[in-house]
Image (tube, rainbow, N blue to C red):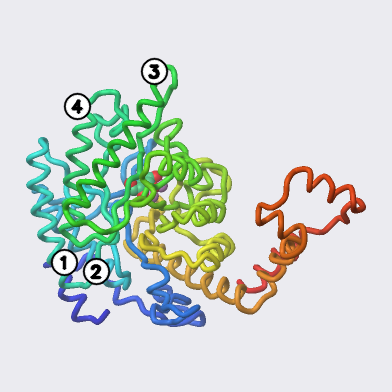
């Protein structure tokens, strides 16, 4: 992106004045405000890095989250928070957001409805506010070329949703969630959003004693059908995504993990329109690896989006740290490349800087590091697939199904008695090594 474009995206004030456009300088550069690996035009496996990743900045963590936690208030003082008028404040925040995203050179952003502007005291007031701020967003998008990857509704923060949104035992609350999702869909469509995400933060239970789980899950499915039908009726052609997470804030979330969500989508006739948005830290909270969740979703043909972050090996909660582990990301990208997954929903950095990272530079370092780790891992994963014996070694483990009785079994031509007769006609099978350490060494060799 050129400097003129950046100027266009600035409002009256620069919010990140000390930072210029972040450029690719290669891994020998010692400029911390440069990309060492992410070179958006570099072609890897037939596509540019820009096309592979479709990186997005998350509005909520980057421009709303001020570092507050259950033990203390925010530590990051956003200059726009000093302004009293909600629309003015929201516009200033948006100026900052577009300045940041332009300087970083990321093509997309993602938001919840009330990340953009504070919720009003009535539905009508919220609607008016959203309408004004999305007018402004439209201008900013046009001036900068930055696009909306997906929108979503925050139907988990307002106290009214304490017992759930689409799964609330009270119909009136469910209706409020419906109104909010309608308006968030309208905002997404107005801004040319490419996808729409549902993360069911409070769609789950705290205690089964007071919960009719079957009814709640049925309501969730009905609600999603209504949302999908409405959006399609408004001409929305993008993909809807469900973002699995096992727990937090509820004890048990209905969209527990990829396997659970796939079954839910199939059971309720939603899998033609909905796919999965896999988040790293949600995978690990569900006691899976990121790679596992991607593989499960991809095998079902339902993988289309990633919320990139990482958890902490020592902590059990959703710490939403920026990705920095080349091994974890390489293993993930191996799944994407092998299965030729098209990431319509791209890669959104659903991650936040630490509470004590209080300089605005830190938000740049965090994104630069995350983009670099993806770029570096992409190069490694591509090489592993094209230069190493990795695929061959894995295929060899299954070679016995390529001919003879093994092939007939795969084709569904054998009975249990056929297996019995075959087993009786041969000696005890030889032990064949799984060679896990060799596989691990190959991955590390290319990182
Ligand atoms: C929370 C989720 C949330 C969704 C969007 O854990 O990751 O941030 O991505 O509502
Ligand atoms: Ni999360
Ligand atoms: Ni997320």
Q: Mark 3 vs mark 1: which is more N-terminal?
A: 1
- Mark 1 beta carbon near ligand 1 (under 8 Å): no
Q: Which residue is mark 3?
A: 210
Circles 2, 1 touching at the beta carbon (< 8 Å):
yes
Could you classify mark 1 by the number of other residues whose Cα lies within 10 Å: few (under 14), some (14-19), or many (20 or more)? many
Q: Which residue is mark 4?
A: 172
Q: Picture coordinates of residue 219 (x, y %)?
A: 31, 31
Does residue 173 appear left or right of residue 218 in this picture?
left
- Occupied quadrant, residue 56: bottom left
Calculate the distance from the C-alpha at mark 3 to the C-alpha at mark 4: 19 Å
Q: Mark 2 vs mark 4: which is more N-terminal?
A: 2
Question: Front-most of 140 and 335?
Answer: 335
Q: Mark 1 vs mark 4: which is more N-terminal?
A: 1
Q: Nearer the viewer, mark 2 or mark 4?
A: 4
Q: Nearer the viewer, mark 2 or mark 3?
A: 3
Q: Picture coordinates of residue 49 (x, y %)?
A: 42, 75
Q: Which residue is mark 1?
A: 140
Q: Which residue is mark 2?
A: 146
Question: Front-most of 2 and 345?
Answer: 345
- Occupied quadrant, residue 393: bottom right
| 365 vs 83: above or below | below
**Residue visible at 42% across and 39% down?**
267
Does residue 375 appear left or right of residue 125 in this picture?
right
Element type at marker 3?
Answer: helix
Q: Mark 2 vs mark 1: which is more N-terminal?
A: 1
Calculate the distance from the C-alpha at mark 2 to the C-alpha at mark 4: 37 Å
Q: Nearer the viewer, mark 1 or mark 4?
A: 4
Could you classify mark 3 by the number of other residues whose Cα lies within 10 Å: few (under 14), some (14-19), or many (20 or more)? few
Element type at marker 2?
Answer: loop
**Residue visible at 52% across and 68% down?**
337
Element type at marker 4?
Answer: helix
Calculate the distance from the C-alpha at mark 2 to the C-alpha at mark 1: 8 Å
């Amino acid at each position: 992106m050129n400097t003129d474009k950046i100027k266009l995206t600035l409002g009256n004030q620069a919010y990140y004045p000390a930072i210029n456009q972040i450029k690719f300088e290669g891994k020998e550069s010692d400029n911390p405000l440069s990309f060492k690996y992410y070179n958006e035009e570099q072609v890897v496996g037939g596509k540019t890095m820009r096309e592979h990743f479709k990186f997005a900045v998350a509005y909520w963590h980057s421009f709303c989250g001020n570092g507050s936690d259950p033990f203390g208030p925010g530590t990051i003082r956003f200059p726009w928070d000093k302004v009293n008028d909600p629309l003015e404040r929201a516009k200033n925040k948006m100026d900052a957001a577009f300045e940041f995203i332009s300087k970083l050179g990321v093509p997309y952003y993602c938001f919840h409805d009330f990340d953009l502007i504070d919720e009003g005291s009535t539905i009508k007031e919220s609607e008016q506010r959203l309408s004004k701020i999305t007018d402004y967003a439209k201008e900013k998008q046009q001036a900068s070329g930055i696009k909306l990857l997906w929108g979503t509704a925050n139907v988990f923060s307002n106290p009214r949703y304490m017992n759930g949104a689409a799964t609330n035992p009270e119909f009136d609350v469910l209706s409020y969630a419906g109104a909010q999702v309608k308006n968030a869909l309208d905002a997404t469509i107005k801004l040319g959003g490419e996808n729409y995400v549902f993360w069911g933060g409070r769609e789950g239970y705290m205690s089964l004693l007071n919960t009719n789980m079957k009814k709640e899950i049925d309501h969730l499915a009905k609600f999603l059908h209504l949302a999908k039908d409405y959006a399609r009726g408004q001409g929305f052609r993008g993909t809807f995504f469900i973002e699995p997470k096992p727990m937090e804030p509820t004890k048990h979330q209905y969209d527990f993990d990829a396997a659970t969500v796939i079954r839910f989508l199939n059971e309720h006739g939603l899998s033609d329109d909905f796919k999965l948005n896999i988040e790293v830290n949600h995978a690990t909270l569900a006691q899976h690896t990121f790679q596992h969740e991607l593989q499960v979703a991809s095998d079902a043909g339902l993988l289309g989006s990633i919320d990139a972050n990482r958890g902490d090996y020592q902590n059990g909660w959703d710490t939403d740290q920026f990705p920095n582990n080349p091994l974890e990301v390489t293993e993930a990208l191996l799944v994407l490349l092998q299965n030729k997954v098209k990431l319509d929903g791209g890669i959104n950095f659903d991650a936040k800087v630490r509470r004590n990272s209080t300089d605005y530079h830190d938000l740049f370092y965090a994104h630069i590091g995350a983009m670099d780790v993806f770029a570096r891992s992409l190069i490694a994963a591509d090489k592993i697939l094209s230069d190493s014996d990795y695929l061959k070694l894995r295929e060899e483990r299954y070679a016995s199904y390529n001919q003879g009785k093994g092939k007939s079994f795969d084709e569904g031509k054998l009975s249990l008695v056929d297996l019995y007769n075959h087993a009786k006609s041969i000696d005890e099978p030889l032990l064949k090594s799984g060679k896990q350490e060799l596989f691990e060494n190959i991955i590390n060799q290319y990182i």
